[in-house]
Image (cartoon, rainbow, N blue to C red):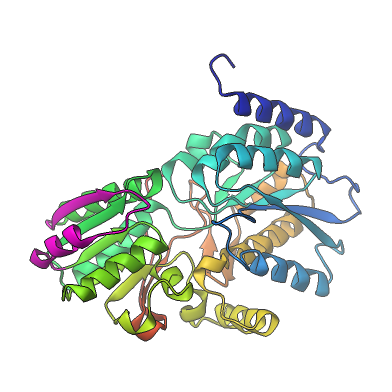
Amino acid sequence: MKNSPAWLAAAVALGLSAAACAPGGGVGSSGANGPIRIAYLGILSGPNAVKGSTDAFELAIKQINAEGGINGRTVEYKKFDTDITPQGAARATSLALRYRPVALVGYSVTSGLKASILSIKGAGIPVLHNTLGSLTSAKNLKYDRAFRMGPTTTQYAEAANSYLIDTLGVKSFLMLHTEDAAPSEGARKVIDNARSKGIRTTERAVPPNVTDLTEPVLAARKADAIWEWGYATTDALVVKQAAQNNVKVPVMTFSVGSAVASGLLPAELATKNTLNVSNCGAAVLRTPESEKFVAAYTKAYGRSPADYLSPNNYDSMYLIKAAIEQAGSTDGAKVSDALRTITRDGACGTLKADDKNNMFQNVPVLSWEGGKPTLAKLEEKLPTDF
């Protein structure tokens, strides 16, 4: 491990130690008949933590246990705080593996999962994660027990562009994105996709902490739309400054719903052409399973399960349940094999692993007129290159 950062060397050592203590393939410390343990890994503290982000995950476990558990076994869980850094995720993973879970759920930061994967491989258990970039594909992780519980950057790009181009008739747009890894990768996918369809694009890259987007917003006067890929702060800023400068074009974003929910964007500034691509869309899909989930979630927590509250973790737990029941075992290899074959109508729509272990092939596009989400279009059967 010459030239490796000290934190990485320490984390790998801890992870290998934890994996050595872990059960072969994830049986769990209580043996074949005791509780089934699941570890949740996510950002639980600090400015990037989202209150309620584990609610959907915990709701699924409560429901599963109320229904008799998994093969008659109670499900137990612990939550581990990854924070937003790679070293935080690696440290949390090492602690999680000492809990001896049969599966890991969560991980929203690409670099965090990447930093943790050696330890996860050592344990041999499946991980159902929420990252979206190519670095955390099963192929690039070199781990065929990693399953993605959300669309990829490629699928988001195709869904958004299909709506802008085919539905709204956009012929040109300004691509605005923050300079960090996932938004930059996403922007490249968007631009390449648009140009392949003969659409003119102009690009602007800005720091994640940008406080003024006047220049790119004014540049968008010559375009048919703005496509902005960043964070809730930049989503809010671009919509507000477009309104201030009378730039009345559709604004596609990655997460404007979070900006509305957090109060960063006043609801009255959101129009029917204030849009975002969704990682789930349970609140607007109107399928029997999504409506059942929304009703249960709203009853339990007093609010609707917005996408920023990670409703896909609810589906992760039910996929794990189905896989263990199909495999008749908690062995990591057998559970992973089962996960590849299961089709589930879940809270986030129909879930089925493709040949790259991606569970999502559909992406909802949401409209936020008046700060209320509605389904503008469901883009379906979207392929991905990783």
Which quadrant holds residue 166? Answer: bottom left
List the single residue furthest toward the top. 2
Which quadrant holds residue 255? Answer: bottom left
Which quadrant holds residue 106? Answer: bottom right
Q: Which sits in the foreground, 71 or 104?
A: 104
Q: Position of residue 8 (x, y in %)?
A: 61, 28
Q: Which sits in the foreground, 129 or 47?
A: 47
Q: How many marks?
A: 0
Q: Position of residue 155 (x, y in %)?
A: 37, 56
Left or right for 95, reference 202:
right
Task: Please say whether residue 140 is visible from this viewpoint.
Answer: yes
Left or right for 356, reference 46:
left
Q: Is residue 281 above or below residue 358?
A: below
Residue depicted at 67% across the width and 34% down the height: 119
Q: Position of residue 355 (x, y in %)?
A: 48, 47
Left or right for 12, reference 228:
right
Q: Is residue 269 above or below residue 196?
A: below
Quarter of the figure with the C terminus: top left
Residue depicted at 71% across the width and 71% down the height: 59
List the single residue furthest toward the left. 222
List the single residue furthest toward the front. 211
Residue segment shown in magenta: 198-224
Magenta stretch encompasses residue 290: no
Task: Please say whether residue 253 is visible from this viewpoint.
Answer: no
Q: Which sits in the foreground, 222 or 349?
A: 222
Q: Position of residue 33 (x, y in %)?
A: 91, 53
Quarter of the figure with the N terminus: top right
Magenta stretch encompasses residue 222: yes
Q: Which sits in the foreground, 14 or 377?
A: 14
